[in-house]
Image (spheres, rainbow, N blue to C red):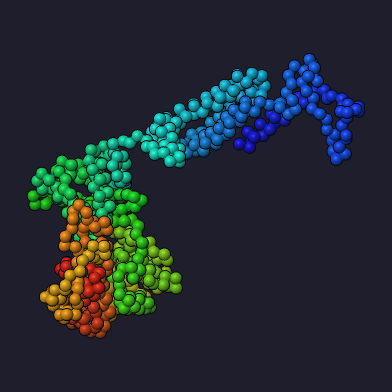
Amino acid sequence: MTLAGILVAVIFLAIPSSRAQEPQPTPPAGGENAETPDTSGWPTYPLPTAKQFGKDHSVGRGPGFYLNFFKLGLVWALFVLWVKTTDWVSQDCLRVNLNYAVWNTVIFGVFATAFVLIWILPWFEVALPLLLVAYLAPLGTFLIIRNRAVQPHQRVMTPDHLRHVFADLASKLGVKMQAEKQAAWQKGPQVNFKAAAGGGRDSEGNLILARRSPGYVPTKELLAELLDRRGEAAMLEFAGANVAVRFQIDGAWHNAEGRDREQSNLILAVLMTVSGMDTNQRAKKQEGRMTVEYKGNSFLSRLTTQPVEGGERAVLHLHPTKWPILTFDELGMRAKTQEQLKELLARQSGFVIFSSMPSGGLSCLFDAALKSCDRYMRDFAAVEEVNHREHDIENLQVTAYNSAKGETAVAALEKIVRTYPNVLVLRNLPDGQTVKMLCEQIREERLVLGAIRAKDAPETLLRVLMLKVPPKDFVNAVSGVVCVRLMRKLCETCKEGYPAPTDALAQFGIPPGKVQTLFRPPTEVDPKKPCPDCEGIGYKGRTGLFELLVVDDGVREMLLKSPKLDLVRAAARRGGMKTFQEEGLVLVVKGVTSLAELQRIMKG
């Protein structure tokens, strides 16, 4: 643009001044029309008229009007447009891998030559079209060659591209206009898939194949309905002509609108294709993964299909790729429990184990524990399996290992202990050899945080022993266990109170008359006008129940002498552990949840 500006300036300077060549009239010598000299500057004279110039001057242009501003405006507008276009061509050549040196020379040189000629040619009717051709011809040639070298959706100045440009301009003026003509697969909710490779095709091939299916849009509608209802899983049960559909919301399954067999087969085929599974092998169990994007959120999805008696079952689980790390308060942990757990986490050495049942909130609990620790004054180092990575935590150095390649957690541990960390973190305790090595590190004055699946805190200790860890090593190392279960909370908008049943309270050990009113979901729900907050479910959101077992000498003795669940549980109770039932009753009395929900959780 600087070179073009210099070119214009040179041309304008080269134009001779017409006024300088015109004869100047002699000022009158005196009389009534004599001018008084202006001593502050140049003398002024009355402007001459065309009549005063006489027949020798056929055109009276007057002072200063030596250019046609309308014509100059047209040339200037085309010049500015050319500058913008030249800049775009230069950048676009780099994007689409064309020879920018050649095209810059062509686009610039042709127009610049024509731009010089228009100041020489005395006929504007010829000069302007010449300049227009010099602008459009090289640009049109570039566009033809460029569009042949790119994908269809990358082409410019096509009908689809122009429609998109006009729609964008219209939207800025408040006019709604569809940006482009939608293909069949683009219709329906804005659900996008990132497919996995499989079935003899790469990920892109699987996605293209799925988009060609008439079941693609119904699949997007199913997932949009699931996510709009806060669901985390969907189940399709194929049996007979119809297919039953259920959604898992807040950890509980709810019936959804069923689908006919033909449409459901198409939906399942699409899900299997984008998950990299073989659609021709529905008679055996398969598992695949993909990514789903909806309303700005991304979900890692796991699809499992397997034959069952009388038909087939498919379950799709959705896990957010990003979710906030909550605090103990936000998880619902009581202040007293927080105080005890934080004391365990602040120790210089010890073995703190976290546990839950599958999909029971273990990751959220572990993240909250790490967030509560001082990771600035102490060095934290973690070992994770490469295919089961968790949240990235600030100031937590992660060493990954790949078990599929024969790598082990022990080998990864041997590497990081040489860096002398203060705290070792393993979100999954894989085997007894790893736990044995962790126990040895505790003797080196290190704190260890580990995790394993279990129903409650006492069972967690026995689960670790079942990994064939030397009992004495583990018993002397372990300092505490915290286990979590997730419980649904009553919807604050539609929950209803009712007189507390004495027989049910007696089952939980609550004396008669101590609690007068309990709460439950509404007993009557109008299907046409469900609660706007929970959509008639009666529950919305979940909170945590926590068992914290601080391992004392009584529990250690029982683990060594008689490691049976009932005996370890009794020893933990004597040491002051509050059970899930006791923690849940507090929430029932407060009206946070219902007695029926507590019974469901305890039964689970």
Q: Is residue 574 left or right of residue 507?
A: right
Say which of 335 and 400 sits in front: 335
From the top left corner, tell me how far across and down residue 247 is, in percent.
Answer: 20, 54
Q: In the image, residue 181 lies at what x, y percent? A: 35, 34
Residue 543's place in the image compared with 302, above or below, is below
Quarter occupied by residue 19? top right
Q: Is residue 458 visible?
A: no
The residue sitting at 8% across, 49% down in the picture is 310
Question: Where's residue 462, x and y in %?
Answer: 20, 74
Q: Quadrant of residue 86?
A: top right
Residue, x 21% and y 84% (percent of image)? 574
Q: Residue at x 23, y 62 (%)?
A: 494
Q: Quadrant of the N terminus?
A: top right
Viewer-closest of 3 and 593:
593
- Quadrant holding the C terminus: bottom left
* Rendered view: 525 above or below 456: above
**Seen from this angle, which residue lies furthest front?**
32
- Left or right: where 53 falls relative to 1: right
User: Looking at this rendering, what residue extends furthest in the top direction?
Assistant: 55
